[in-house]
Image (cartoon, rainbow, N blue to C red):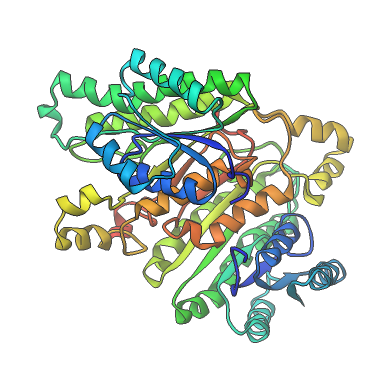
Amino acid sequence: MGDLDRKRALITGGASGIGAAAARLFAAEGAALALLDLDAERGRSVAEDICRGGGRADFIACDVTRAADAAAAVARAVEDLGGLDIVLHSAGIIVRRSVVDLEEADWDRVLDVNVKSVYLISKFTIPLLRAQGGGSIITIASGWGLVGGPQAAAYCASKGAVVLLTKAMAIDCGPDRIRVNCLCPGDTDTPMLRGEARQLGVPEESFLAASSRRPLGRVGTPQEIAQAALFLAGDASSFVTGATLLVDGGGLAGG
Amino acid sequence: MHGLKDKCVLITGGAGGIGEATARRFLEEGSRVTVLDRDEAACRRLEGRLPGLTAVVRADVSDPPAVARAFESLDRELGRLDVLVNNAGISVRSPFLSITPEQWRSVQATNLEGVFLVAQQAARRMLAGRGGVILNMGSTNGLLGYHYYADYNASKAGVIELTRSLALELAPTIRVNAVCPGFILTPMQEAEYTAEMQRAFSDKIPLRRLGRPEDVAALFAFLASDESAFITGQCFVIDGGEIAGGLASQA
């Protein structure tokens, strides 16, 4: 008996980090999955791993920033799964540059992956959820969608947009029994976080040590963020919508 | 939820409404649950309804000696405390100009000072033991203004700030979070509001329904469980989307 028995979930960015951790957890809780990612090799490997463990997961290669790709992937996911109950938007990237140093292509790419993909995948999945009588959509923003951070201008702008896109969708979708909530992780030990150290040209270990300076004294694990996503996905949160859940070890609780 | 089995849980104001639903939820999770409430008759009725409770302690959270005595008896009966749910609270609908100093003090005493007194007793024990989780009852009224509950709203804003400050000071041993419910239909409110009034309230909420005590109980269980191990200093809104937008969303 799992928390997501008989549920069907679509996860973007399911090949690594928080998306992959959520995929493993959702599958363990009984959900059948469609994993979308640009990285077909890693995505397939996560799906195969889940299937070997007795779970159910299909991988669908998809560039979620392109409408035609997103529409086709959603259509295939629904065909594979026989319906849809949960959408987790975990595709995301970061470019650690200030406005002055950002190239136009960086800006476009960050906004496309982090924001436009949420719009596109939601646009194509909401009518399906509505027709089925409801569902749960979870977006992933960041602590840096609520406060600013250094050398991350496009990322902060994109995550702030996700926070309010979530609330706007929650208002529009509530009457259709579709809940839409936003998960805001603090620094979490993912390939993306370690990639930031490389972008900034600092050693990974000292970057992680600096990221650990928060009340709980450590960075989060992808599994911990996945647990929060599971809570928002399942019936335990059936009155929660339009909410922002910060999972950050107390990082933004105060100074 | 994971990690709630055999946990020692104390719920203030637990003899009815959201507190009782929370007690029931933690019992279902296999926790050892103690309820603290000042309402003697409600405590007796609760003992009949929830025989699985470890103890039901009569005490007023706004009375420092009574809180201290209650914790001494808990020390004897439970021996330790893992989870505190600071749920006790009162509200009286009054236009601002009608709030008497006595009413103001009484609302702050139960809703804010009560949280302080009980949290301090609990934190001492959790720091000396294996750590723990403190959960406080905030409200969406502590985040936005609302008509005719100025004293209550101020008390809940206080609870939210107290939550964040405790999260910093008590980390990493104790996690401290608040929940901020919107309109939750407790048995008391079910009796107070006509079906028509309830429908009018529901229409302003994106999910088109009022919350149930069980909804909030499930959130408390999540925030007390191992699933939320990286969450502290948070105020979690559970309101069916009511405050996701301003007035525009209520058209």
Residue B15 is left or right of residue A119, and the answer is left
| Residue sitting at x 43%, y 40% | B53
Whether residue A140 is visible, yes or no, is no
Whether residue A111 is visible, yes or no, is yes
Measured along the vertical axis of the image, is residue A64 above or below residue B178?
Answer: below
Q: Report x, y in % for residue A183.
A: 58, 51
| Residue sitting at x 59%, y 65% | A118
Residue B195 is left or right of residue B177, and the answer is left
> Image quadrant of residue B18?
top left
Residue closest to the far left: B98
| Residue sitting at x 26%, y 63% | B203
Q: Report x, y in % for residue B40.
A: 25, 31
Number of marks? 0
Residue B168 is left or right of residue B236, and the answer is right
Q: Quadrant of the C terminus of chain B?
A: bottom left
Measured along the vertical axis of the image, is residue B60 above or below residue B21?
Answer: above
Q: Report x, y in % for residue A22.
A: 69, 59
Q: Report x, y in % for residue A138.
A: 57, 60
Measured along the vertical axis of the image, is residue A23 above or below residue A202?
Answer: below
